[in-house]
Image (tube, rainbow, N blue to C red):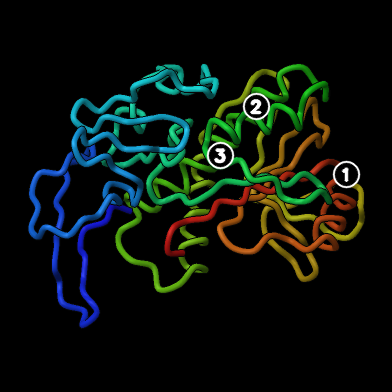
Amino acid sequence: GAVRLLVDEAANITDSYTYDAWGKVTARTGTTANPYKFQGEWQEENTGLVYLRARWYDPGVGRFLSRDPAEGDSFLPLSEHRYIYAGDDPANMVDPSGQAFMPGGIANISLTMNLHSAVSAGSQVAARTMLKSFLLGRPPKDLGYVGEMILDLAIKAVTDTMLFGGGEYKNKGAFGTAAHQELKGRIQSYRPLPGFEIVAEPFFGDGGNGGYHGSPKRGDMGVDVLIKHNGKNILAFDLKVGRGYSNTGIAQRMKRIGTNVIQINIKVVGK
């Protein structure tokens, strides 16, 4: 976050900073030399420009000075604008690297497919690109499109839980439960392409035939989302805001479901 206070060795406040939503310093007390201000990044004293690693940002106009080096995504139209900061919504979004914006409460997004190590994506746009690479060439046609929609719904479930969840959660588990319920509601109202069926929170027994039911029984294993095509299980997703499954847990789910399992790991600030 932005630097708002400086203190001396006795913990007395020596300087304070107030910013508008775009990062422009609107009020200041104290005279201590300090180059680190908005988002904790280097801010040039005379011009007010902020160095966001990939490029310079001007908080006075809410725009970057050079084109975004990262490709945008047609599903997120604002990501294709080469100069805007934080998706033109700095109250809810951040742009920490100067390459791709994401919701302010999300520290990182990573994806894991089957038994492979988690791969950090960082932003929603980068996560979509990574998912495309996971699903490239996998039948049926339009699986990638449906998979990307599931990813978007999962990220939206987490961000809406942060923004509109009704207050503080006593621990990470309580937050995770609320986010999963939000995702379940979104999945149940999602209408996929013809031939596809999206199942929210299916539970699988140890029979290994891909059969599932809606209420857990002793020894069952579940996932958050199952994608079916023409009646066949073709891909499963599971949302994690805490620890992911062990390799054993993933392998068992793959065997019971009969298809690939992708974990969406979303690290939330302070959770």
Q: Residue at x 69, y 27 (%)?
A: 132
The number of discs equals 3
Q: Residue 165's spot in the image, x, y percent?
A: 35, 55
Q: Does 233 sit left or right of 9 as displayed?
A: right
Label 1 sits on residue:
258
- Residue at 21% x, 79% y: name it: 11
Q: Is residue 124 above or below residue 110?
A: above
Q: Look at the numbered disc 1 and give the secondary structure of its residue.
A: loop
Point out the frontmost of discs 2 and 3: 2
Q: Residue at (40%, 73%) from the top-left corner?
A: 170
Q: Between marks 1 and 3, how big is the CA–CA gap?
A: 21 Å
Residue in front for this viewpoint, 24 or 129: 24
Decide which of tag 1 and tag 3 comes sooner along the chain: 3
The answer to which image quadrant residue 120 occupies is: top right
Q: Is residue 34 above or below residue 229?
A: below
Going by the numbered disc 3, the residue's amino acid type is Ile
Q: Residue at x 21, y 74 (%)?
A: 8
Q: Secondary structure at mark 2?
A: helix
Q: For this view, does 154 lie left or right of residue 94?
A: right
How far apart in space, not on screen, are marks 2 and 3 (Cα)?
12 Å
- Label 2 amino acid? Val
Q: Which mark is residue 119?
A: none
Q: Is 149 on the left-hand or right-hand side of 174? A: right
Mark 2 or 3, nearer chain start: 2
Mark 2 packing: few (<14 Cα in 10 Å), some, or many (20+)?
A: some
- The circle on residue 146 is 2
48 or 171, nearer to the observer: 48
* Residue 109 in the image, given as x and y percentages of width and height: 57, 46
**Type of amino acid at the residue the image marks with label 1:** Gly
Q: Are marks 2 and 3 in contact (CB under 8 Å)?
A: no
Q: Which mark is residue 187?
A: 3
